[in-house]
Image (tube, helix red, strand yellow):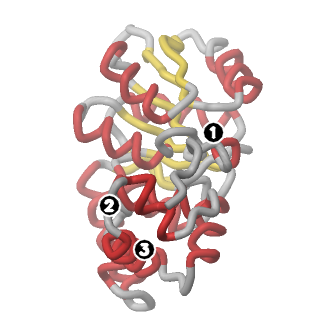
Amino acid sequence: MKDEKIRLMIVEDHPLFGEGLKRVLELEDDIEVVAEARTGKQAVVLAEKYHPDVILMDINLPEMNGLQATREITSLFDDIGIIVITAFHDDEQLFHALRAGAMAYYPKDIQPSELVPAIRQVAKGNYVVGDMVMSRPRVASWLLRRFEEMALFEDADVVFAPLTQREMEILKLIVDGYSNKEIAAYLGISRQTVKNHISAILRKLAVNDRTQAAVLALKRGWISLEEVGKSESRQRV
């Protein structure tokens, strides 16, 4: 990026971890932290306001998880590179992060000696998958191969279809312990519509019941533990 500093935004809901990242990264002469966000929705707002070159995006965020925020930001700006960082790390999560628009993906225990070079590569428009630096066409080919591999073991629709915003909203209410009847009243929709959404959620997550869906959502950080039980009062019907 010539001699200009890389303008970085950190999206992390735990202040201690976020401040630690900021202190480490600002030691680099070519990196400047221009914004910090605590929620997924705030990340989208600040991305529009500050237009950073690179965003470090946690997955486990309040209001909107990191994958949703990544998808929304990359749909608005094709010149912002996003690096997803997460406490839950596996190949499937990597696949979904790249599909959401991320250009790199790392567990939270990554060392600065790995993260800083990745930030520089992403700022140049490159993707980083493991220890490989890739161009957009190479990543597209990698995603296609990974999709084909996953489709051998799962329904292709399950692998390729992310949860919609409404489905994520319903999934959070499931995690909060809402019944179908309470979800319908809370959202102002019919109970049959709720059932249809839940069926879609179970199919996409490849789980058998609501409990398994809730456990998976929490395990992967799609729903923040801090949000559980904080929905508005239930509408009893």
Which residue extends farthest front?
237
Tag 2 residue: 189
Residue at 57% x, 40% y is 61
**Residue 159 seen in this snapshot:** no
Tag 3 residue: 198
Q: Amino acid at mark 3?
A: Ile
| Distance in Å between CA atoms under marks 2 and 3 | 13 Å
Q: Image check: 126 left or right of 217?
A: left
Mark 1 or mark 3, which has the lower sequence index?
1
Q: Position of residue 195 (x, y in %)?
A: 39, 76
Contact between marks 2 and 3 (CB within 8 A): the answer is no
Q: Kindly state the secondary structure of the residue where label 3 is placed.
A: helix
| Distance in Å between CA atoms under marks 2 and 1 | 47 Å
Q: Image check: 141 left or right of 231?
A: left
Residue at 63% x, 57% y is 176
Q: Which mark is residue 114?
A: 1
Residue at 66% x, 12% y is 27
Q: Residues within 10 Å of mark 3 (few under 14, many from 20)?
A: many
Which is more toward the observer, 126 or 179?
Answer: 179
**Residue 81 seen in this snapshot:** yes
Mark 2 or mark 3, which has the lower sequence index?
2
Between circles 2 and 1, the one closer to the viewer is 2
Q: Kindly state the secondary structure of the residue where label 2 is placed.
A: loop
| Distance in Å between CA atoms under marks 1 and 3 | 40 Å
